[in-house]
Amino acid sequence: MKRDRARLVTNVALGLLLAWPAAQMVLVRGYGLNPWKLAGWGMYAAPQLEPQVSIECLTPDEVGRYELSSVQPAWRREFERFVRRRSGLGRLARPDELARKLLDEYPAVDAVEITVEQPRLNPRTGMVEAESTTYAHARDASVSFRPRPASRPRSRRQD
């Protein structure tokens, strides 16, 4: 009985060990997870690059839309936490907490738009390209966002 149980545990562990690389590849391709995270076996095939995050605020007055050029000390920790999470978890890490903290901190701002540009290695071309994702957060549902012109992916040669 003990021998059968030990064999079952060993077989399950070996099966999980063999299946994990495929599961991790699905997570990397599907959700943009960092291949260096979660014990990925393909980690040496991709550079570890940090995302660039920009924040735009929308106000109802004559200022309108403006880009936040610096992060206030009051929520710098939340900003850095999001960048770290985004670096590892890819698109699974959403900036909802960061946007909520910003809206709470600045009552004159009706909405924020957070754009994340994550550099990724294109396996076909071998070039590093920025994958851009934009998240819009409004204080209430009546705020409408003016569409911005679409940006083309930027390629950077990695030497």
Image: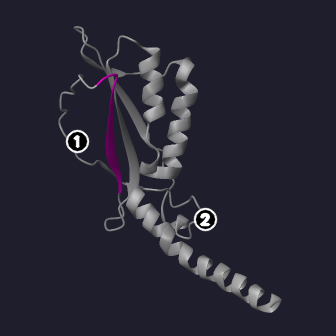
Q: Nearer the viewer, mark 2 or mark 1?
A: 2
Disc 2 on helix, strand or loop?
Answer: loop
Q: Which mark is residue 151?
A: 1
Q: Is residue 35 above or below residue 106?
A: below
Q: Which mark is residue 39?
A: 2
Which sits in the foreground, 67 or 11? Answer: 11
Q: Amino acid at mark 1?
A: Ser
**Residue 70 visible to the viewer:** no
Q: Which residues are magenta?
A: 128-140
Quarter of the image for residue 17 reads bottom right
Pointer 2 with pointer 1, Cβ within 8 A: no
Residue 37 percent coordinates (x, y): 57, 58
Number of marks in the rendered image: 2
Q: Main secondary structure of the magenta part?
A: strand
6 vs 148, left or right, is: right
Q: Is residue 131 above or below residue 137?
A: below
